[in-house]
Image (tube, rainbow, N blue to C red):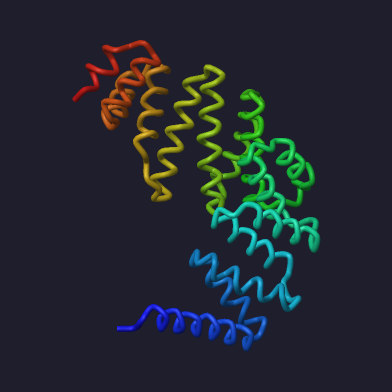
Amino acid sequence: MRTPSAVLFVALLSVLAGCTSMRAMSSREIRIYGDEAFHREAYQRAIAFYEELERRGKASAEVTARAAIAYDQLHKPELARAKFEAALERNPDLAIARLYLADIALREGQLEGAERQLEQLDESKLSQHDRVVANTIRGSILMHRDNPAQAVVAYGRAIDLGRRSPSATRHYLDALEGAAGAYYRLGMFDRAADLYTELVSAKQAAREPVTENDHYTLGVLHYLRGDFEAARAELGQVSAERRARAAEVLNDDTFFQQDNAG
């Protein structure tokens, strides 16, 4: 059995060997290995390769942006922000960097910062995927500003584009959920229910899990639009605690607790 000190020594040798082997690689090989690690979601390993390229002065703005995305996936927004800003110094038109910076700012509640990033984008030059992302973020900013009427316009653009953009599925789903919430705020329950139904169908098509919260939300929306049969079908898939919550919010104990108990 190895002693703790022996295990530590072997681990140290492995790290050193990894550093040595990376430095012996060509920059092209490092980029290939970095991208391979990135696509496998081995983000820490990808960062090591990309930062070696930066150390050599061989990193493009796109490489630095990938390192930034990896840091963001590892829940290190400060490091991600610094990398995205460095990428923009090399290429001010790099849309993915501005979109991620807008998203990070939005997550942190910095609405003005998110808006500034979007304002610097030339939407006419954006790919369809990036326009889905930009409009989804814009819709979310408007919801945070308590402006659901304008939010549905931005979300609507994202949804129309997202239906034709398989690579933007995640943001298409976010836009559907956001738009349903905005229409709910506007009291337009038919439209909200239609969009949330589309969201559930899109999740199933993308092999993403449909959650208890999805069934609960869709059940409540069907109830509000007056489609009680559809509401019962959805609420039959949620817990008694969830039904009790809906009964309290909507003041209908009979429907939510008795009719759906089985």
In terms of depth relative to the viewer, which is nearer, 87 or 193?
Answer: 87
Q: Is residue 227 above or below residue 251?
A: below
Q: Is residue 241 left or right of residue 169?
A: left
Q: Is residue 146 left or right of residue 196?
A: right
**Count of numbered labels shown in the rendering:** 0
Give percent across and percent down for residue 12. Answer: 50, 81
Residue drawn at x 73%, y 65% is 61
Residue furthest to the left in view is 262
Residue drawn at x 50%, y 85% is 13
Q: Quadrant of the N terminus?
A: bottom left
Say which quarter of the image contains residue 28: bottom right
Q: Quadrant of the C terminus?
A: top left
Q: Is residue 1 above or below residue 261?
A: below
Residue drawn at x 75%, y 52% is 125
Give percent across and percent down for residue 55. Answer: 71, 75
Q: Is residue 159 above or below residue 33?
A: above
Residue furthest to the bottom in view is 24
Give percent across and percent down for residue 232. Answer: 29, 23
Residue drawn at x 68%, y 75% is 53
Q: Is residue 40 left or right of residue 253?
A: right
In terms of depth relative to the viewer, which is nearer, 88 or 77?
Answer: 77
Q: Is residue 77 left or right of residue 122?
A: left
